[in-house]
C-alpha cells in the first residue's frame, strides 16, 4: 500500500491500528474493561498489515511473548529445506517491529509461502473472563515468494518463521536477513546449541522438528517436556515423537508413507478385502501453548495448554481426532473412536520399555470383550 500514491483510506486504517497497538495492555475482560479500550485493541488485531518495512512492535503482547528484543543482535542465515506439505519450520525468528528479508535462491517449480507463527486465532479467548491476554491473530498471512524474488516483511508481534509448500520433495533454498535464532532442534548436531539457548531464555518460544512431526512450544513448556524422565534429551524426545506420536497412530489408522511402519495384520486385512492403503506424506504439528477449545484442541496444528509428551494421552488423543474420520459404531460417542490411537501408542510404549501406560484407569478388559 504505502509506496503507492493511492489507497489513502487503507493506509489510514493500517496506521490507526499501529497507533492503537501502542496503547494495548493485557489482560482485558469483556465486561470490566473500558469498551473503547477493548474495541480499539480488537480492531488493531484485525488490521495487522505485515507486507511493509515500517510496522512498530506492539509494546505489550501479553502471555504470547516479550516485546523487547534489544538483547538480540539480528543476523543472516541461509536455509535449505525439502518441501513437505503443508508447512515446515524455518528455524529462524522474526523479531517484532524489525523488517526481515527473504530471498529465494532455488529454481524449483513449486509454490512457496512465508508466514510468521503457528498459533491459531482460537487460542486467544477474548470473550472469556479476563481471557483477552494476547493478540487475536498472531499467525500472519502467507506471502508467496517466487524463485529469484526477495520480499520484506515486518510483524508487530514477531515469532518463529514458517515455510508453506505447494507440493513435496523439492529443494528450497532461502536466504534470511535480519532475523533472530530462537531455540530450534532439527537433529543431534543441534543438541549443545539447543540446550544453551533454552537455558539462556532469550526467547519465549522453542521448536523441535522431526521429518513427520513438529513441536512449536512456549519455552517453559519445552523445558517441561525435556525434564520428563522418560525422555530427558532433545534426541530422545524427537525419537519419541517420531515413533509414538507419528508412527503408531498412523499405523493403526491404516496409512503407509515416510516414517510409518508396515503392520502385516493391517495390510493383509486390507488386501483381503480389496481395500487401498492410503499414503500419508505431510508434516503434522503441535502448539504447546493454549488450547483453542477446552484444554486441548484437535487440528493440524493441534494445540493445548500442556507440554508435549510423545505418549501423552492428550497429545495422541488430539492427533487421533484427525484420523478417526467417519469410523464410529452406532450409539458410540465421538471419543470412543479417538482414544484407541492413544491406547495403541501407550501399549506399544509399554511393550518396548515396560513403562506404565497410564491409560486413565479405564476398563480395558471389558472393552476388549465387547470388541470380541
Image: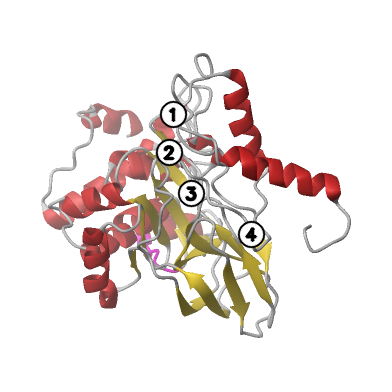
Element class at badge 2: loop
Could you tell me if the residues under marks 1 and 3 are in contact, i.e. CB atoms within 8 Å?
no
Image quarter hosting the C terminus:
top left
- Residue 219: image x %, image y %? 31, 51
Q: Residues within 10 Å of mark 2 (few under 14, many from 20)?
A: some
Asked whether the viewer can see residue 282, the reply is: no
Q: Earlier in the sequence, mark 1 or mark 3?
A: 1
- Residue 164: image x %, image y %? 59, 64
Q: Mark 4 or mark 2: which is in front?
A: 4
Element class at badge 1: loop
Q: As drawn, is 39 to the left or to the right of 82?
A: right
Residue drawn at (49%, 46%) of the image:
119
Marks 3/4: CA distance? 30 Å
Q: Mark 1 or mark 4: which is in front?
A: 4
Q: Which residue is denoted by mark 1 in the rendering?
A: 27
Could you tell me if the residues under marks 2 and 1 are in contact, i.e. CB atoms within 8 Å?
yes
Q: Earlier in the sequence, mark 2 or mark 1?
A: 1
Outermost residue, right direction? 6
Q: Residues within 10 Å of mark 3 (few under 14, many from 20)?
A: many
Q: Residues within 10 Å of mark 4 (few under 14, many from 20)?
A: some
Q: Mark 3 or mark 4: which is in front?
A: 4
- Residue 179: image x %, image y %? 48, 69
Could you tell me if the residues under marks 3 and 2 are in contact, i.e. CB atoms within 8 Å?
no
Give residue 62's mark: 2
Asked whether the viewer can see residue 308, the reply is: yes
Give residue 301's mark: 3
Marks 3/2: CA distance? 22 Å
Residue drawn at (38%, 51%) of the image:
249
Q: Which residue is denoted by mark 4 in the rendering?
A: 54
Amino acid at each position: 500500500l504505502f509506496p503507492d500514491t493511492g489507497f489513502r483510506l487503507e493506509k489510514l486504517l493500517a496506521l490507526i491500528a499501529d497507533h492503537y497497538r501502542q496503547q494495548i495492555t493485557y489482560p482485558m475482560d469483556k465486561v470490566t474493561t473500558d469498551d473503547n479500550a477493548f474495541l480499539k485493541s480488537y480492531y488493531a488485531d484485525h488490521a495487522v498489515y505485515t507486507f511493509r518495512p515500517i510496522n512498530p512492535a506492539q509494546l505489550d503482547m501479553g502471555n504470547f511473548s516479550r516485546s523487547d528484543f534489544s538483547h538480540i543482535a539480528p543476523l543472516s542465515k541461509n536455509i535449505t529445506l525439502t518441501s513437505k506439505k503443508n508447512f515446515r519450520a524455518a528455524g529462524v525468528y522474526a523479531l517484532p517491529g524489525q523488517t526481515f528479508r527473504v530471498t529465494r535462491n532455488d529454481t524449483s517449480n513449486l509454490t512457496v509461502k512465508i508466514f510468521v507463527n503457528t498459533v491459531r486465532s482460537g487460542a486467544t479467548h477474548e470473550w472469556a473472563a479476563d481471557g483477552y491476554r494476547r493478540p487475536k491473530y498472531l499467525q500472519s498471512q502467507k506471502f508467496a515468494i517466487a524463485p529469484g524474488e526477495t520480499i520484506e516483511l515486518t510483524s508487530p508481534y514477531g515469532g518463529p518463521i514458517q515455510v508453506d509448500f505447494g507440493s513435496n520433495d523439492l529443494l528450497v533454498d532461502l536466504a534470511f536477513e535480519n532475523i533472530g535464532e530462537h531455540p530450534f532442534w532439527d537433529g543431534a548436531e543441534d543438541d549443545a546449541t539447543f540446550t544453551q539457548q533454552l537455558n539462556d531464555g532469550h526467547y519465549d518460544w522453542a521448536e523441535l522438528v522431526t521429518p513427520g512431526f513438529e513441536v512449536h512450544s512456549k519455552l517453559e513448556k519445552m523445558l517441561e517436556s525435556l525434564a520428563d524422565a522418560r525422555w530427558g534429551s532433545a534426541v530422545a524426545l524427537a525419537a519419541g515423537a517420531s515413533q509414538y506420536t507419528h508412527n503408531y497412530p498412523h499405523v493403526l489408522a491404516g496409512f503407509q508413507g515416510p516414517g510409518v511402519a508396515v503392520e502385516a495384520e493391517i495390510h493383509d486385512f486390507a488386501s483381503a478385502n480389496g481395500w487401498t492403503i492410503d499414503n500419508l506424506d505431510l508434516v503434522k504439528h503441535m502448539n504447546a501453548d493454549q488450547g483453542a477449545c477446552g484444554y486441548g484442541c484437535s487440528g493440524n496444528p493441534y494445540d493445548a495448554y500442556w507440554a508435549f509428551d510423545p505418549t501423552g494421552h492428550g497429545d495422541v488423543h488430539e492427533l487421533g481426532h484427525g484420523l478417526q474420520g467417519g469410523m464410529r459404531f452406532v450409539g458410540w460417542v465421538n471419543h470412543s473412536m479417538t482414544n484407541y490411537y492413544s491406547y495403541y501408542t501407550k501399549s506399544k510404549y509399554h511393550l518396548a520399555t515396560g513403562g506404565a501406560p497410564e491409560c486413565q484407569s479405564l476398563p480395558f478388559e471389558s472393552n476388549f470383550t465387547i470388541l470380541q
